[in-house]
Amino acid sequence: MTEETDLTTYDYDSEAAPCQKADVKQFASQFLPPLYSLVLIFGLVGNALVVLILIKYKRLRSMTDVYLLNLAISDLLFILSLPFWAYYAAREWDFGNAMCKILTGVYYTGFYSGIFFIILLTLDRYLAIVHAVFAIKARTVTYAILTSVFIWGIAILASLPGLIFYKAQKESSHFTCSPHYPLEQESIWKQFQTLKMNILGLIVPLGIMIFCYAEIIKTLLRCRNEKKHKAVRLIFIIMIVYFIFWAPYNIAVLIHTFQNSFSLNNCESSSQLELAIQVTEAIAMIHCCINPVIYAFAGEKFRKYLSTFFRNHIAIRLYKYCPVFYAETPDRFSSTYTPSTGEQELSVAL
């Protein structure tokens, strides 16, 4: 689902002959539904665990915790719209005009808010390492909540064109959910939307990340810290992963929108560009599954909390209901179960 292409509409080449793009539609119907399903499963589980651990164990005691929670929520918002787009890619739009607008708004709100909270996390790390003294006053939970509310407002504003211009209607023999800009301003709106996506979704984030992480690396290299090399390596991974997942999609959308400027306005080139957008967008969506690993589970505390959660809530239930899974005796565990209170504790001997 993109603002510039529609998997089920028709395009026209320079001679106004119908460009059916059957190969593009067939690829979308076969490739996108299973991929969206995998992203839904892994992204839902990973981000739900982040939310659970942040609320249950960390209790949102720092600015980083608040931003991580909002990033996970934005990813979940983005992910929850995928089943509808998977169905749409395989068949046609059967959910009506209202759902078309709502889901488009949800999709792009999750898209922009996720990017914005990645920027806030970058700035948070920058303040904590480069301006440690100032960060003591600035990195508070109150400021984190205020900036988070502001970011959600900006993300909703950036998503408004999708909410306004997307609509469901019958085209040819099937229903679509696609953008319908005012005819006399169609080209201007498409170019504006694409430039907005590239500026807010690629250029600004990468610029901020490069500046902040360059300063962070300088600061870490000046400090005598046994873990500095690991921290620098993690920083490079964050930058590279973000660029790898999002840059191809933004570039493909940019070229498709300005294909006349690149002399790519024929049917074959247009079909190839739409295919490239489908593939690169699917790759970009995987990033919301990677976020929990990069921003949360890479931390030692998060791994500790995750281990505690599985011991206390998963392992003991597996042992209680399926003891056959354990080859050893219950003596392997030091556990108590109080039927009167329903409280369970499990300590695994390593």
Image: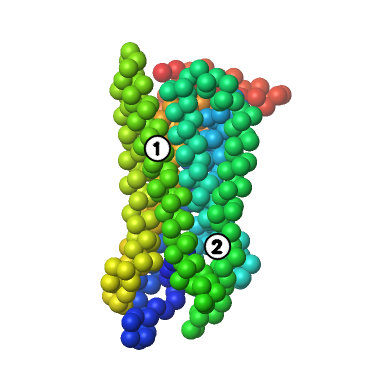
Mark carried by residue 162: 2
Secondary structure beneath dot 2 equals helix
Is 292 above or below relative to 88?
Answer: above
Is 148 above or below relative to 270?
Answer: above
Secondary structure beneath dot 1 equals helix
User: How many residues crowd around disc 2 within 10 Å: few (fewer than 14), some, or many (20 or more)?
Assistant: many
Is 58 above or below relative to 262?
Answer: above
Name the residue located 38 percent from the left edge and 56 percent from the top edge. 250
Name the residue located 59 percent from the left edge and 54 percent from the top edge. 157
Quarter of the image containing the C terminus? top left
- For residue 2, which quarter of the picture? bottom left
User: How many residues crowd around disc 1 within 10 Å: few (fewer than 14), some, or many (20 or more)?
Assistant: many
At which x and y percent is residue 327?
Answer: 41, 28
Amino acid type assigned to the residue bearing label 2 in the image: Gly
At which x and y percent is residue 306?
Answer: 49, 29
Q: Earlier in the sequence, mark 2 or mark 1?
A: 2
At which x and y percent is residue 17?
Answer: 35, 86
Name the residue tied to disc 1. Answer: 209
At which x and y percent is residue 199?
Answer: 43, 51
Is 117 above or below relative to 33?
Answer: above
Residue 233 in view: yes
Name the residue located 62 percent from the left edge and 34 percent from the top edge. 145
Amino acid type assigned to the residue bearing label 1 in the image: Met
